[in-house]
Image (cartoon, rainbow, N blue to C red):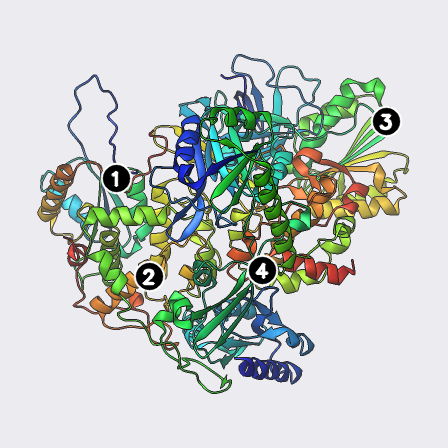
Amino acid sequence: MFKIAKAKWPELWQALAREGQLYLPALVDGKTDFAPWQKDTKVDLLTAVTAKSLKQLFFAQVEPLMHFQTSGKKVAVTPQELPAQPTIAFGVRACDLAGFTILDKVFLKEPVDTFYRARRENCTLIGLACGFPEETCFCQTFNIDAASPAGDIQTWLVWDNLYWESRTGKGQQLTAKLAALLTEATAEDAKLVQAQQTKIRETLSKLPLGRLRFSPELAKHEQEVFNSKVWEKLSATCLSCCGCTYVCPTCHCYDVRDYAGKDGAVERFRCWDSCMNGDFTKMAHGNPRKGQLERFRQRYMHKLVYFPEDYEGTFACVGCGRCLRICPVNLNIVKVAKELEVDLHV
Amino acid sequence: MQKIAALMRQKAQELLSSGQVQQVAAWRKGQLAYDNAPAVFTSPEACADLVYDEFCPANLSKYLLAATKKKLKTAVFLKPCDTYGVNQLLKDNRVQREYVYAIGTPCQGMLDIKKIRAHGLKGITRITVSEGVVQVETVYGTQNLPQRDVLLDKCLQCKGNAYMIADTEIGEKLATPEPRGDAFAAVKRIEALPPEERFKFWQQELSKCIRCNACRDICPACSCEQCIFDNPAAPVAGKAFADPVEENMFHLIRAYHVAGRCVGCGECARVCPQGVKLGLLNLKFMKDINTFYGPYQAGSDATTPAPQVTFTQGDVEPSAAGQKGRS
Amino acid sequence: MLGEKVTVADKTAAPAPFEPKIVAFCCNWCSYAGADGAGTARKQYPANVKIIRVPCSCRVNPLFILRAFQRGADGVILCGCHPGDCHYMTGNYYTRRRLTLLMSMLNFMGVATERLRVEWVSASEGARFAEIMTSFVEQITALGANVKLRDLRCKK
Amino acid sequence: MCNCQDTLIPQIGVVTDVCRETADVKTYRVEKPGGGKLFEHLPGQCALLSVPGMGEAIFSITSSPTNKNYLEFSIKRCGSITTYLDDELEVGQEIAVRGPYGNHFPVEDKLRGKDVLFIAGGIGLAPMRSVINYMLDKRDQFGSIDIVYGARSREDFVRYQELTEIWPKQPKTKVHLTIDKPQEGWTGNVGFVPAFLKALQFTPDKTVLLCGPPIMIKLCLAALIEMGFKKNQVYTTLELKMKCGIGKCGRCNIGKKYVCKDGPVFTCDELDEMPDEY
């Protein structure tokens, strides 16, 4: 383990930025979110939950896939070049890192999404333990340890020191390049880190959602959950905006659309989409998910039932709590899961 | 507030058991200190979950759209500012009066959890309000905040405690927060900037948008069956956020479509996950309408025609409007 | 940032003089006939002006105007009957209110409102129609290409 | 072209033949621009066709895999893309194609040696035709073939010539046609497919391949069960909105299945286990 004192952090950001485009949590307009680092960036390492998840780093909200050029009866297609720039994300929390393993299951499964893979491989992820978890956090529900984040490198912020430990080869390579800035941590330091870890786990258990568990039984009763009467009650007040989908680190539905420019130039792009949108499944002959209830149900069925069925019981949720914070009408996966568990007696 | 909540529960149970209404729109207790959710109650027993406190900002008038469609007589608890929304929906003929039972509900201003968090408070376990002081208990300690500092922005422009529509009222009217200064001050500040600065401001502001459409979906004036932005043939893709011009168009046209019908409830700005200053666009239209066509408040009744569907022969010319505010 | 650069197609050739694209929404009952009138009277107006005939000026949705800009128009002009002369009695009064608010908002958003003009032209004012179009084209030529409201995809 | 091409990037194909089948159905033949088949497929699989600027849509491949020269798509005018295809697509036009996607009818194992009953309604013949021609080309691998096909009128039969002149002449192959309402000059059966099915009195030892409008599927299935068929004997093919074709974009998700990847071919007992959302 290494350490680096607060006074040297600006040098650290600079050094990291030399190795690739650096993203870290920054305070902009009173809101902390991941942003590309610049000299005047106000880095915020204390806020545990950034406004959006980091998924857009690998799965961009809008991304051109290819360009067509049509002329007369001819059509030519030019694939978009894959992104090649190395990136480094610093200060990624355990929940977001766990989110990537869920996206990996989808996008890295054959046939691989090459855009996602290129970005994923070009990126070195530096995790940061959550010194101050928030009341909306429930990562422990999914056995995600906020005190030792995954990633290529994991770090801890204790008082004015950042403790640094590489976990993968990629992490070691990057660490080696920063040798001039990092000093070896002592046994004393290791104790401080351990103490913080214990503290974090303790705090998490004291939070309102600290003892929350999602029942694995849900995934075993697909039809019962699907036909549960709670959907009507829960979906009645959903506005069907897709805020929850867009901030979710695991939601991965997308749309492919064409933009027709002039003189036969066409850009085909991919953009985030949500099963909450009315046109998501709309076809010429009708819509199999006719109303709010069906669409609302789909989102939660996918996270709590279908995904676990497909991937050995893994819920498509990492407990980051962003949907709890964003929903204009305070609906969220925790309320849905609880209601379902009560309804199904599981 | 607890007293009011008890009265509300009682009223809701009464209305449901007497069969006067088929459902009641109110709020249900959440799992955190502040996450009460709008909810529809259909049985007197279910009303045990009904709550009301300083964290019930949502304007429930939009749920009347679904109630009208299903032809269900619905009792709805309305804070003074929410009553404007109901009137507007009635005026737009999107909600029918026969399905509405409006219950005026007193309010002292709602609190903004984002502002509370902005004081560095995390791990919130309990929030209590008394005598203008908000006590926030967290797993890391307790802190007191002056209530006025953590009121929602929309409450700082409170239109007062009068109900614009109510079949009955719950409890005594409460003193609402004193409005802070000129409602149009922020609009005037932008107007005073040189054009390039204004352009830059809006590009920056609107580029934050992630097209979640929450602003549209919560708005009591956005009551179309199908939004133009959900039309695949529209020049602006419904959910893509692909080009700065699209963002401009979406927000400009959305604000334009509600111009003269926007009641100024401030819900769009409240629900925006990205904190886009959406209210400014609506306020600008309100200010223009007041200046060009005389003072007008949408939703203060259900009959006065909106300024965009009426005219006078001596109206100001578009060319004059374009010149205004230029440096 | 959007709008900073104007692409020149071929850098080796001398840049062609800027030819603005103007979209004119013309009411069927007045200005469209006015354009005809300009033709019959042999009054010339620049060929940059592309006319879109509408049944009444109030048919023009603000989205039409923004879309014209998005898809490459450098200027948009909307012509309707003089207030009081609407074929449908009141259409142009609504147009006037709508466009007033739109103009004011575009200005508020820092978009040059010189690119958008509203004129009342009757069927008998062929000469005036030609004059208005000529002056508008001159004005837009002086302003240069519209970049603030143009979609730059497929152009990069 | 880079070697790391994404599966979302289509190939370019050229339309070499357009055949007007009915008032709203055309069959398009697509080949590589220089000639030859764009890709190999199995009966029942789909491909995404796209008109740049309009978008993509998924269609089942109606030509048989045994055809080594081209792919064919029978497409009914219905939504925005199909309307564009119907109006604009002519011989020589290039379009973007990617595929094949999805699973297929089990012609290589479970259907081997079986007596097969095809039931189709309207444009539902499109995926069936691929299987029928495949089986007819490998006639000795399969038992008897019965084709029950219903359409609104005589003019609404897709591939009428094949139905009346080619298929019935093949060994152990029968074609049973029916139309919804009586029509002058029509000597065949009149009535809906489910009733016709019962009248034909098939024995329940056949394997059934069923495709048509949802209501027809539902009623035919009921009729088949009444006749003693089991649900696992009946294969059908689903259609949902799709964008990616590779089980990622989330549109065609029903239960844990993605129709584009795990479907479109399902047996009716598999469908029973899925949430009712198709």
The chain under label 3 reads D
Q: Amino acid at mark 2?
A: Asn
Q: Is residue D77 left or right of residue D124?
A: left
Q: Establish whether labels 2 and 4 are both on one chain.
A: no
> What is the CA distance from the residue labelled 4 to the residue labelled 3?
57 Å
Of residues C141 and D138, which is closer to you in this image? Answer: C141
Q: Which mark is residue D144?
A: 3
The answer to whether mark 1 and mark 4 are in CB contact below 8 A is: no
Chain ID of residue with mark 1? C
* Residue under the image location 25 percent in, 38 percent down: C147
Q: CA distance from mark 3 to mark 2?
A: 71 Å
The part of the image, by quadrant, that contains residue B66 is bottom right
Q: Are marks 2 and 4 in contact (CB under 8 Å)?
A: no
**Around disc 2, counting alpha carbons within 10 Å, would you say few (fewer than 14), some (14 to 19), or many (20 or more)?**
many
Residue at disc 3, secondary structure: loop
Find residue A238 and name its label. Answer: none
Q: Write down the residue under mark 2.
A: B282
Residue B292 location, x and y as percent? 21, 66
Question: Given contact means CB atoms under 8 Å apart, are the residues at marks 4 and 3 in contact?
Answer: no
Q: Nearer the viewer, mark 1 or mark 2?
A: 2
Amino acid on which disc 3 is placed: Ser
